Image (cartoon, rainbow, N blue to C red):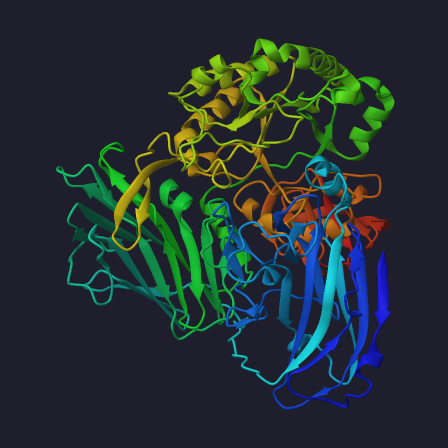
Amino acid sequence: MILAMFIGWMFADLSLADAQTRTPIQEPDAEERIEPEGSRAFTLHVPELAGSMNVVLTWRARVDADRPMTGREFLKVAVNGASVGAMRDRLNPRLIDKPIRFRSHKNKLRYWYTEGAEGWLTPFAMDFTVPVPGWSQGSLEDAYAFKIDITDLIKPGAENTLTFKSLMKARYVQKYGSRYFQHARGEIVLKDVSIEFRNENTTLTAKSAQKLQGAESLDWDLKIAPSGDMTVRWYGQTAKIETFFAQGDGKWIGFADDAEKKEVSRPDPSTWKVYLQAPFYRIERTIHHAQSRIEISDRFLLEPNSDTAVVMPRIRISVTENTYGTIWLGGDNDPSLTDVNCPYNPTLFIPMDGAGLGLVLEDDVLRLQASFSYDAKAGSALVRSDEMVVSQKAGGEYTIRYTLYPACHNSYWDFINTVRKDWNISGTLPGTFWFTTPRNIILSNPESIRGYIRENNVAYVVFWENPDPKDYQLQAPYIVKGAAQLHPKAESVLRAFETDERNAIEKLHLIKPEVKALVYVHSHVCSILDPEQAVSLEDSLIVGQDGELVRRHAGDSRFFPLYFIYPSASNSYGKVFEQLIDHLLGLGADGIYWDEMSAATGDARYTYSEFDGFTADIDPEMQTINRLKGLVSLLSSDYKVAQVKRLIDREKVVHANSAPETIAQNLLPITRMVETTTSAARVKELHLTTPYSYTWAPFTMDQFLDRLFKGGLCFRPGKESPFIGRSYPVTPEYLGSGYMLGKNRIVTGVSGAYGWDEPWQATMMVYDVFGRIIEQRSLEGKGRREVAVPLNGLVILERLHRN
């Protein structure tokens, strides 16, 4: 619903805006309530601006909820159709009344605005007097209040439109009703919307990377200085790469411009060896000059008399003559992002005039620990770990690896596709997914099932993990997770549900045997049903920094007590989790749907019960270890890889929810997805795996294109979205902004030249903004042909096989 409010009369007496003028858009103490998926629009006339006048939009907002929460990115604000974010670019903030980020009460870094979701973080609260969890950087009012510079988006002397839209799905209210919305309805409550005119324009000019005619081949030069730092010159650009390491006494050593001379050798024309001695370890650096990239490895060797040494590596890339207003960190060019931990996409890319420089982390430890940041004023990018140690437990050594990609283009997409090729990231997305219940399959007509699968190119049928209490007459608690499903106390809850799973799988195999039926598993949560079970899993339960076991869904009456856990080859849960997989496959399933397979982010990221050999809480000033800990990803990755290979050897299918967290997982021949229901920004996690982008209904063209422009492909079809099914199967060869090029199919929301190198024939399907097919015809050619895409529409080229 969109409600437009015309308020031009408010400026009737202002022919020219003067300094420090504030004009309310809402009546004093008035509230606007925006229902989930709803909008409100205000139309106003803005006068001509005097001199260097700034225009500032202000508002207060909250999500109406029964209990407080730090918030979600559920409010989209637009001025004249353009989304308003926290930064214009990396040199110029829009958000002017508070920092663009803060740490929540759970010590999580939160941003007031997320570019990929186009959403402002809006606190959950019953009213505007409720303290916001984690907010301590200002007054209580500041947590709800926003002041945004919109000067460049305003049309002076003309009518302007302000739009506030709720990005909360109606389904979100249903899903989390028992937690937040038993009484409240999830509306966004707006107050104090106003326009201010300020005479304080301090805008900096950010240099924009120009798209120049690229060189046909890359010609670049690499110099290694006596101090060990590197300088790369290519296509008119220069970058200096320096690296620093902790000495363990609060001081730093490294391969840097002002460091002492190093021992440098050159075993062959394309390889350099550089050596560095620290008090507790030594470093052997190898630099290899490959055809299109520079491969760097730093091997840390612990001194024999040392048990654990602090390393804390820092990699600094300086392009000081280029102060650009953008950079891609972890596949995201949101200008507000900094100190980004992005293990699923461990890359950065700096676009410059007709050129670019990319970096990708190639080892697991630095990939999981590192944060990425960029200082646009200095033209300096930094990759650092504040947690890395080298220890005797890990064999007394470790090697970090990273690769630089000097490029004769300034396209992040060309860069990330080069990395995909170098990492051998490939694989077919075989079709869409049907998430359903066993009872639905059992009760449905075979012809309707067959028709739905055929019309939507369904490849996988996935059964939701929990029995519906209405179907099985269950009373809370009724949700059992993890290997607790094998516990005798779970039988009364799951017996009938598993019988239905078996019967539904048999029915599917009779109706459509080529479609794979997958059953649900989760490796990082487990219900604890009695004290004996807790004792038996003591070595596997995740322990927080406070020494306590880490709960999930505490207070949700539907769940038996649920705890975070991790499996490994040596702990108790690794054994019982394998038994759970085999038990579920015994129901006749073709494979497993492995939910939240990765643990690189979130509450299950660390455990303080086991040291992984590489990770610690470190005092950054003194460079001393406060406490050893384990990254759950490192502790469990080998086990997960072994389980997947075991299942593949049995010709079973594995589909994982979450992107790979280690190199070994990137190379597994399985499909993966990421949940982008509340934030399309998470599509960036898919750029180094299969780009399945999970969403909630309604499955609209707008939702589909939003993910496609970020490099992902929606895969849940609906009655009003036949274009989703026709996008499959596809074997991606190039991910682009708004298009995906595949061996057998091209999906695009951008007009341009498309096709295949050799002679080809294809069916071209053209869809409008509503998802309706408006044209279908044969097309053929050799090489690329121009294709026109309707405004906010889609074109699919489905390649035909020649007889």
Residue ID at (55%, 79%): 203
- Residue 175, given in percent of the width and then of the height, sits at 72, 37
Q: Position of residue 658 (x, y in %)?
A: 56, 38
Q: Where residue 349 appears, x then y in whole percent? A: 47, 59
Left or right side of 727 for 284: left
Q: Residue at x 59, y 16 (%)?
A: 485
Comparing 186 with 364, the one in front is 186
Report which quarter residue 315 is drawn in.
Answer: bottom left
Taking depth in this image into account, of 4 and 191 the one nearest to the observer is 191
Residue shown at 56% from the left, 12% from the top = 487
Q: Is residue 790 visible?
A: no
* Residue furthest top in the image: 488
Q: Does 234 appear above or below 472?
A: below
**Is residue 296 something one can see in this rendering?**
yes
Q: For the N terminus, which image quadrant?
A: bottom right
Which residue is nearer to you in this view: 392 or 19?
Answer: 19
Extreme residue in the front direction: 129
- The C terminus sits in image quarter: top right
- Residue 309 image offset from top left, x and y in percent: 22, 43
Question: Looking at the image, is 219 positioned above or below residue 454?
Answer: below
Q: Above or below — where is 771 with respect to 544?
A: below
Q: With 27 as the anchor, is 259 left or right in this view?
A: left
- Dividing the picture into quadrants, the one containing residue 259 is bottom left
